[in-house]
Image (cartoon, rainbow, N blue to C red):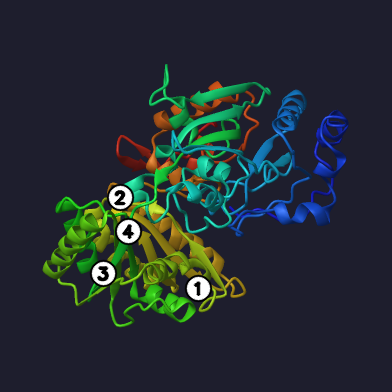
Amino acid sequence: MRHSGSAPSVEPAGIADLAVALRGQVPRHCILTRTEDTRPYECDGLSLYRTLPPMVVLPENEEQVVAVLKACAALNVPVVTRGAGTGLSGGAMPHAGGVLLGLAKLNRIKSIDPASATAVVEPGVRNLAISEAAAPFGLYYAPDPSSQIACSIGGNIAENSGGVHCLKYGLTVHNILSARVVTIDGEIIELGSKAPDSPGLDLLSVFIGSEGMLGVVTEATVKLVPKPATACVVMASFDSASAAGEAVASVIAAGIIPGGLEMMDQRAVRMVEPFVHAGYDLEAQAILLCESDGTLAEVEHEVAQMRDVFHRAGATRLQVSTSEQERLMFWAGRKNAFPAAGRISPDYYCMDGTIPRRHLGRVLEAITRMEVEYGLRCANVFHAGDGNLHPLILFDSNRPGEVERAERFGAAILELCVEVGGTITGEHGVGIEKINQMCVQFSREEMDVFSRLKRAFDRPGLLNPEKLIPTLARCAEYGKMRVHNAEIRFPDLPRF
């Protein structure tokens, strides 16, 4: 499944003609074709999969985006859109015969309206920059992926990103009011509305999370929320991951909706603590970070409830943040889990699957058994409140066979998620990484619906092709496809 990072020996058909077509419409300095210039765009955050793009175009405004898409449609040239490149599923991996369309230069915050608690932004605006700009008005943008200091809002829309506070405040889809989108034909359409509802079908929700396969965002209106008067984190230690998983279910069953509810196993805790010095319990088999926010009275009441629930769930230690600095430090440990992995392993493979909360303990025990089966270590960090797992498979790509074992390990985790009633992705997307597991998650009939939806927006199939939706031939090669909740093999299947 990995793709070569070498430059194509022959320039793909259409690229030379495209360069001619874009003259006078896109500035020459916005078009990159030399290998040393295009090399940085060969992969996103999932570096296992690489393809050198024959051309990178970095438009500076919406008119140039329209020009690029119209030219690509006329010349039948594939287009892969890229934001900040922090994605973790290979969704922004270029096409060997197409254009990589980077939107980093569309990075203006056009307006902030405190009265309606909204902001209008271009797709290249960083996630965190929205909150920084809204802070003087006592507002912020709630979805906060671990990469929020770098990731762009356009990429967040493409992947329907979440973050540690998504349990209470929702994913990207719950925080975008409208989007201005350019289709492959260069048509500009408006999805959603600044009003509480919009007429017709909810196409905005269809578009968010579509991974660049339906259109290109050039502007979004995002929802802002008031900054809470105060916030506090309860850190609870447990002597087993199963006990911590049960505690998560108990919190929700008690009617508590935390601002954030995260879990880390012992390997993750011991990996992070020397890096961040967050004050984590190194003896615990698992810890939970449970945040309450609101007025002082609300937080005091909810923290007391949380402490009671954790005591009854068997917590071995409880620690409550006593200052804003300490609260941020607790979260810094969780948000730095990925970079901290580099201290103990040359490489790591971050997975993303979602399961029913009641199966957290069962799945973690299964992952422990898989460590033995595949001969690799795994550190587990995840959004426990909504069952979104992020296992970090640790490996060394310099050792023969370890990359392949890491891929098989990851595939086994995703298929286990499906087995227990979950999904193969929560916020990272499918991209190229999970395309085989789509064969396990969905039936032939379901994937045909996905294909028809894509054709409704992108009839020639030029936007981010060969990702997300597998062909039947690929499913046959992988040897698995879900049909009426059963797994069968298809030795001779045609393509869609």
Counting labels gives: 4
Residue identifier under label 1: 340
Residue identifier under label 4: 230
Is disc 3 placed on a helix, strand or loop? helix
**Image spot of residue 222 (x, y percent):** 49, 38
Which mark is on residue 419?
Answer: 2
Q: Residue at x 20, y 58 (%)?
A: 302
Q: Along the polypeptide, which appears first: circle 3 or circle 2?
A: 3
In front of the other: label 1 or label 3? 1
Q: Quadrant of residue 367?
A: bottom left
Residue at the extreme left of the image, as rendered: 312
Q: Residue at x 32, y 50 (%)?
A: 167
Q: Are marks 2 and 4 in contact (CB under 8 Å)?
A: no
Q: Residue at x 43, y 38 (%)?
A: 173
Q: CA distance from mark 1 to mark 4?
A: 29 Å
Q: Are marks 3 and 2 in contact (CB under 8 Å)?
A: no
